[in-house]
C-alpha cells in the first residue's frame, strides 16, 4: 500500500501548519488579555496541542477498536514531549543558559516526575488495581488527582513569570479578541480532523507491515501527535521564553494522562493499560529524562557561574536525545 506514507507525510505537514497558527493565536492572547502565563502555557496551549492525543486515543478505541494503541500513543507521546526539551537545549543551549525559570515550573516538572514514576512501578510489577464499583483502574484516579494540582498551580503567577514576555508580531495582532477566538476554534477543529486521519493511517501501517500496535502507537502516533508540542516548544525557546516552553511540554504530559482516564471510563471491554517490555523501556528512559530536566531547572534557579556555561545544557540535551534513540532501538528488539 504505497499511498500510506505520502498520506502520512501530508497529514504531518497539515498538523504542523495548524500548530504554528495555534501557537501564534495563544501568543496574541497573551498580549491582549490578562490571563496568566501559567494558564496560557500549562493549561490552554498544553490542552490545545494535546488535542491530537485526545482524538487519536478515542478513535483508536471506539472506531478502530485497538486499545493497545491508545496506551502506547500516550506513553510514546509523553516520552517524545519531554525529549523535545532536550532537543531545544541541544540546539539553543546559549539561550537556555540565560533563561529564568519560575518555582511553579519546577513544581509542574516534579508532579510529572512522580506520576511517571508511579506508572513505571505499576509496569514493573504488572499491577492492575480496578475499582469494582465503577470499573476504573486506580491509575485513572491518580491522574485526576495530579491534574487537579496542575490546575491549581496554573492560577499562580510569580514575579519571574511576569518578566517573561514574548515579543513577536503576528497576523492576529490587529484582530479583536472575538476574531482571534474564532480562528482558535477553527484551527482546533481542523486539528481534530487531521488527528482522526493520522490514527487510521497508523493502523494501516501497523497492519501492512506487521508492526505491534503498542510500538506503532508509540512511534508513529506518538511522534505525530507530539508535533504541536515540538513546534511550540522550539519557537518559545527561540523567543527566549524557555520557562513557558517547559510549562507547555509538561502541561501537555499531564493532560495526556487525563486522556487515559477519559478512555478508561468509556472503555468497557477490558483495560487500556497494556503493560509490556516496550512500555517499560519508554517509561524508564522517560523518568530519566525528566530527572535531567529537573537538574536543568535547579541549575537555572541557582544561576551560578557554573550554571551559566552553555556546554552543560548542550550535554544534558545530548544525553536526553541519545536516550530516546536508544529506547526506540531496545523496544524494537
Image (cartoon, grey):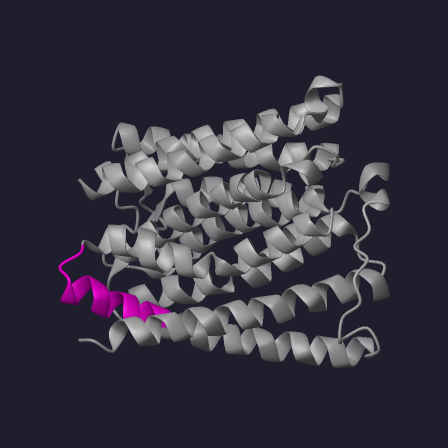
Residue 163 placement, left or right of 206:
right
Magenta residues span 198-211
**In this view of the protein, can residue 103 be seen by the observer?**
yes
User: Horizontal and vertical percent for residue 120?
Assistant: 36, 32
What residue sits 77% from the left and 42% below the top?
156
What residue sits 70% from the left and 18% below the top?
306
User: Horizontal and vertical percent for residue 187?
Assistant: 59, 76
Q: How many marks?
A: 0
What secondary structure predominates along the stretch shown in magenta? helix
Q: Which of the image's four quarters has the N terminus?
A: bottom left
User: Horizontal and vertical percent for residue 159?
Assistant: 86, 38
Q: Can you tell which quarter of the image residue 213 is in?
A: bottom left
**In this view of the protein, can residue 196 be seen by the observer?**
no
Residue 180 placement, left or right of 231:
right
Between 63 and 195, the one nearer to me in the picture: 195
What residue sits 46% from the left and 30% below the top?
319
Amino acid at each position: 500500500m504505497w499511498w500510506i506514507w505520502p498520506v502520512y507525510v501530508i497529514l504531518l505537514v497539515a498538523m504542523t501548519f495548524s500548530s504554528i497558527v495555534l501557537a501564534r493565536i495563544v501568543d496574541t492572547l497573551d498580549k491582549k488579555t490578562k490571563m496568566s502565563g501559567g494558564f496560557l502555557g500549562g493549561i490552554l496551549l498544553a490542552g490545545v496541542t494535546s488535542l491530537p492525543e485526545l482524538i487519536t486515543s478515542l478513535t483508536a478505541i471506539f472506531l478502530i477498536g485497538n486499545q493497545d494503541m491508545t496506551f502506547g500513543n500516550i506513553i510514546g507521546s509523553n516520552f517524545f514531549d519531554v525529549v523535545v526539551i532536550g532537543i531545544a537545549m541541544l540546539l539553543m543551549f546559549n539561550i537556555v543558559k540565560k533563561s529564568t525559570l519560575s518555582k511553579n515550573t519546577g513544581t509542574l516538572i516534579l508532579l510529572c516526575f512522580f506520576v511517571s514514576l508511579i506508572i513505571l512501578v505499576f509496569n514493573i510489577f504488572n499491577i492492575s488495581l480496578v475499582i469494582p464499583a465503577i470499573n476504573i483502574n486506580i491509575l485513572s484516579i491518580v491522574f485526576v488527582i495530579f491534574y487537579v494540582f496542575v490546575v491549581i498551580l496554573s492560577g499562580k503567577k510569580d514575579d519571574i513569570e511576569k518578566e517573561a514576555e514574548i515579543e513577536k508580531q503576528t497576523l492576529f495582532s490587529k484582530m479583536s479578541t472575538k476574531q482571534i477566538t474564532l480562528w482558535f476554534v477553527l484551527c482546533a477543529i481542523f486539528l481534530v480532523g487531521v488527528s482522526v486521519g493520522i490514527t487510521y493511517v497508523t493502523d494501516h501501517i501497523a497492519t501492512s507491515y506487521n508492526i505491534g500496535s503498542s510500538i506503532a502507537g508509540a512511534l508513529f502516533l506518538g511522534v505525530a501527535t507530539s508535533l504541536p508540542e515540538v513546534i511550540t516548544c522550539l519557537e518559545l525557546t527561540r523567543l527566549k521564553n524557555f520557562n513557558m516552553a517547559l510549562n507547555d511540554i509538561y502541561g501537555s504530559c499531564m493532560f495526556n494522562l487525563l486522556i487515559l482516564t477519559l478512555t478508561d471510563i468509556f472503555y468497557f471491554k477490558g483495560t487500556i493499560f497494556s503493560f509490556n517490555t516496550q512500555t517499560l523501556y519508554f517509561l524508564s528512559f522517560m523518568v530519566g529524562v525528566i530527572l535531567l530536566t529537573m537538574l536543568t531547572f535547579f541549575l537555572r534557579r541557582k544561576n551560578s557561574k557554573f550554571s551559566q556555561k552553555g556546554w552543560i545544557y548542550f550535554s544534558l540535551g545530548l544525553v536526553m536525545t541519545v536516550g530516546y534513540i536508544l529506547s526506540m532501538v531496545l523496544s524494537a528488539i
